[in-house]
Amino acid sequence: MNDDRPLILVVEDEPQIRRFVRAALEDEGRVVEAGSAAEALEAFTGPGPALAIIDLGLPDRDGVELIRELRTWTMLPLLVLSARSAEAEKVAALDAGADDYLTKPFGVQEMRARVRALLRRQKVGAGDTVIEFGNIRVDRAHRSVTRDGVAIHLTPIEYRLLGVLLAKAGRVLTHRQLLMDVWGPGHAERGHYLRIYIGHLRQKLEADPARPRFLLTETGIGYRFQLEEPAA
Amino acid sequence: MSEPKPSRGMGGYFRAALACVATTLLTLPLHGVVDAANIVMIFLLVVALVAVWLGSGPAILAAFGGVALFDFFFVEPRFSMAVADAQYLITFAVMLVVALVIGQLAARLREKALLATRREDEMRALYDMAKLLSGAVAAEQVADIVRDFLGSRLEIEAVLYLPRDDDALTAIPARQGGDQHQAHVRAVYEQGQPMHLAAEESGFAPALALPLVSSVRTRGVLLVFSEHAERFCAAEKRPLLEAVASLTAIAVERLHYGEVVQEVTLGMESERLRTALLSAVSHDLRTPLTVLVGLADALTLARPSLPPPALESAIAIRDQALRLSGLVHNLLDMARLHTGKIVLNREWQPLEEVVGSSLKATAGVLAGREVHVELAPDLPPLEFDAVLLERVFCNLLENAAKYAPHGEILITAQVAGEVVEVAVVDAGPGLPPDGEESVFDLFERGRHSGAGGGLGLAICRAIVEVHAGRIRAERRAEGGTRMIFTLPLGTPPVLEEEAGE
């Protein structure tokens, strides 16, 4: 057993789902299983896990509540499992502090990619001053955005929105979180502002705004800024 | 309940005349014994009594008769209408005026007393009926109570007309033949105004149709009828009939609300059951499907790789499980849309965004297909539920991919009058003739076999229609199908300009 591998906690009441998640994540780390919220909290007594995958339908407790409690004392990445057509539940989990979600049923590769992205973010962080994606280069120290070396003009709000998205690249940000971060409290109900400005950003940054590669829509939930996976 | 009727017939006058004659005979022996003025007093007393007992008409007769008899029998020259002493003319005049006034006053008093008794009696009867009505639990019972009341009080018959669910008026109790009155009853029901019907209009007897007006609306019609029209036509019967109609209206309304409460209770119960069932089904199906997809997917990625036939099987299991999962979701969506309880999360947003997310969601199905997006540059933001509209796009795109296996797929959108017209166009074999409308019906499928297409389009229609839009399918002249749906334009909220660039 290689002890350097990160510990991944899987909180899910269905043993069969735990089984295949464990099998799928063998390459990513050591998997610890928990069938309930109580078992999940127990798993933190030893060496803490590096990431937790939490099913929102737990037998003993509301999954969103568990996330809220974990967030009071740990910043470990949280990946939520939820049903489709349960957008409200996902938004609640993300607002409570979850970092990403997977809709059941999900493929193994999709899950591995999410887990890998969350673990990597944990390691490096997103502190680089210069970020590049596609043919776009954002220099946060000089507040400049260029496409193929040509400067692109962004309005202050567009720049702030891009900044917030880049700071949490790879993670899902709910409409509410983005409105709070960019426009400030009291603007949480102005979803159309956000959508219009996202549209502006796509016009300026994406090659085909109708089919964005980086600024992705999570319908009914929010947005995700997807930096390209570094070639493995 | 026999009521003392005022003697309007000749009997009253006859008795008044008789009273005058009797008074004359009884007072004749007093002539010369008492003063003539006292005889006059006796006659006035009789007029007053006649007025009280027999009413105003006989009292007038008694007044004139009294004066005449007094003149004839007591005033000199006796047994002649002639008057010797002219001052008796004053006596006659005063006697007549006083007799008439007393008579009228007394008669009016009597009539008022009679009226009061009758009103009290009516009130009590109405009260008794109201008490009976408050206990009625069915429309038939209400009709019986009203019929009993009108039959015993006014000796008239009655039929109640109440609207059914389809708003057609039904007679209670059911009547045979004679349908001519139906149109009139309908008119009374719709206009809320009473109407007299002649015998030939009603088809059986003179009738009066009274609307059952409650606080909210007209609840039905009360039709009263009798061969003797005067039994309900007389103006003084009207308040009673109207009171009966209004009590009936209250009873009918109470019954109606009782039914509504029962329906709502039942509806809530079945809604609760349905929701519980839906969530149980969706959870119970999702778990094994998640396991199936996950395990099959893990097999396809296993290292060392499975031998080719096993790998193909694993891929097929995964794909079919995913398809089954999509089907289950469609079924659940349809169930939710069909119960009409779906809550729209409508927000103003650009159409482009949901097109993008739909293309991403269907990337697997559309792999290798050329998809062109042509959205008009002047497209304003629209108000819609993004999750539901994404379902529409995904279903239309999946449909296009499935039924048109080759050729490009085109998504267009432009403003067309008051709406935005969105189209998903494919170059497939096209719809069967006359299939333009039926493709959206539940479980209808195109010419090609393939599961779920029909359900997907039925969901599209349900979603578009809750957005106040319309969806239709067109055969393209050059081959292929154009699925077109509309969304209303509306007035997007004004965006504050960003201050200080």
Image (cartoon, coloured by chain):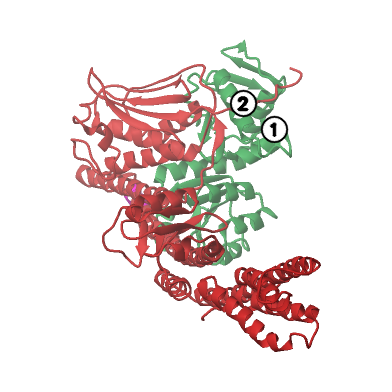
Chain colours: A green, B red
The image position of residue A46, as x and y in percent, is 62, 62
The chain containing the residue under callout 1 comes to A
Seen in the picture, residue A54 relative to B385 is either above or below; the reply is: below
The residue drawn where x is 29% and y is 31% is B401
- The boundaries of the magenta stretch are B294-298
Kindly report the distance in space between the C-alpha atoms of the residues bearing marks 1 and 2: 11 Å
Q: Which residue is mark 2?
A: A197
- Residue A213 seen: no
Q: Is residue B306 magenta?
A: no
Q: Nearer the viewer, residue B246 or A97?
A: B246
Circle 1 SS class: helix
The image position of residue B285, as x and y in percent, is 36, 57
Amino acid type of the residue that numbered disc 2 sits on in the rendered structure: Tyr
> Pointers 1 and 2 in contact (CB under 8 A)?
yes
Report which quarter residue A136 is drawn in.
top right
Q: Earlier in the sequence, mark 1 or mark 2?
A: 1
Left or right side of A144 for B279: left
